[in-house]
Image: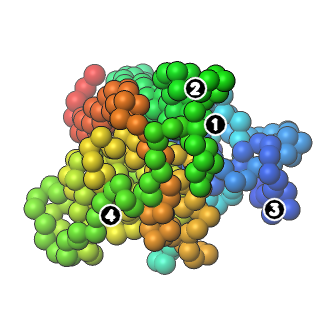
Amino acid sequence: MAELIKVGNLCEITSSKRIFANEYQEFGIPFFRGKEVTEKYNGKLDVTTELFISEGKYVELKTKFGVPQTGDMLLTSVGTLGSTYIVKESDKFYFKDGNLTWFKNFKGLNSHYLQYWLQSPEGQGQLRKSEIGSSQSAYTIANLKEMHISLPPIDEQLRVVSYISKYDNLIENNNRRIAILEEMAQSLYREWFVNFRYPNHKDNVDSESKQKLIDSPLGQIPVGWKLKPLGELVEFKRKSVKKGRVPEQTPYMGLEHFPRKSIALSDWEEVSEIGSDKLVFSRGDILFGKIRPNFHKVGVAQVDGLCSSDTFVLSPKKPEHHSLIAMVTFSNEFVAQAVQTAQGSKMPRASWDVLQDFTVCVPDTNTLKSFNSVVAPAIEQIRVLSLKNRNLKQQRDMLLPKLISGTIKL
């Protein structure tokens, strides 16, 4: 029987020192809040932050109070509760007091084991006991120190971490492959459709060896290419399902399931009831999160399912346009247009009435076929890797509580 010990006796639980608004700057050392941990991608705090502090301020904090070190753990303690992050050797950042709780100076407790324990039913129960507040739940440091953990010997902790981390390593490797495929597809899109350096573009030249271009509202484009508004190329789907019962294990995808800057939509709930009207989407549809479009939440649906009404569901009218439309809506230019024309201050929403007029440069048939021959397989490979990751996560999450409880011995 594992010994029951207060977590506060096994590590130091604290927060950061307060940083005042006048100490923020546009560049420097990243300054994170809870959302960076909640929305980390590929296991890294690599989402874009709007806040930085100076190198001098960072050195001052490091000297006087310390900064997050390799192996320390951060826990989101306001807003979206319970997300964790283990600090890596390459990390260099500071964070907002109150938003994140800092676990450090571990004694007889491995930080990775604590992270896995917090994901188990036992750990989740202890976290729920640590919550305060009604309108906005939060964790207090005092309550977190009082959590009781069933602590096995350190060698057993390390065996559990080693076993479970194999799943996480496979998931991370697949995420790296997905990121490479996404970057390749976007780079190809930029080269061909923004810079017009598509295959055989040097053959499309006039007698003076200049590329044949024609004038257009966007400037000069290659001969044989056409400009089309996005709304003419896609079906803007608004079919909805009323709240209430739905078939068992219906996939539901809220905006919280969308990763930032990745078309790999592999996270969703399986529901049998919905509390409000939802939109219907089909596998292959392009989903664009319209709330706070600067979050860059856009991807390709992996399955048929339901999504939040705060999502644009776009279905290319012609199959041969699918890869092009996916890359257009995923592009920085399209997202920037959505951000610039969003309506509302506290919760800005992109407007389809505006975005349907976004201009898409449609190439000649041969160029489109060449583009599809590369990008369509990449999108399909992303789908395959995403579904593999979903299966790996499910297997890991089934094993985790049994390993933590000692039901399965290693």
Q: Mark 2 highlights which residue? A: 205
Question: Which of the two discs, 2 and 1, labels the residue nearer the N terminus?
Answer: 1
**Is residue 119 at all visible to an observer of this figure?**
no
Q: Is residue 137 toward the left or the right of residue 90 in the image?
A: left
Mark earlier in primary sequence (3, 4): 3
Residue under pointer 1: 105
Is the residue under label 2 in contact with that under label 3 (CB below 8 Å)?
no
Say few, some or many: other residues with alpha carbon within 10 Å of mark 2 (under 14 / 14 to 19 / 20 or more): some
Which residue is rendered at x = 36% and y = 40% of the image?
323
Residue 282 x %, y %? 22, 53
Residue type of the residue flagged with mark 2 = Val
Read off the residue under disc 4: 236
Cα gap from disc 2 to disc 4, whole angstroms: 38 Å
Q: Earlier in the sequence, mark 3 or mark 2?
A: 3
Q: Earlier in the sequence, mark 4 or mark 1?
A: 1
Give the spatial CA distance, label 2 vs label 1.
67 Å
The quadrant of the image that shows the N terminus is: top left
Position of 222 relative to 232 (above/below): above
Measured in 3D between alpha carbons, the distance from the residue under mark 3 to the one under mark 1, in whole angstroms, is: 27 Å
- Check if mark 2's residue and mark 4's residue have beta carbons within 8 Å: no
- Residue ID for mark 3: 20
Which label's residue is closer to the chain start, 3 or 1? Answer: 3
Q: Is residue 297 above or below residue 184?
A: below
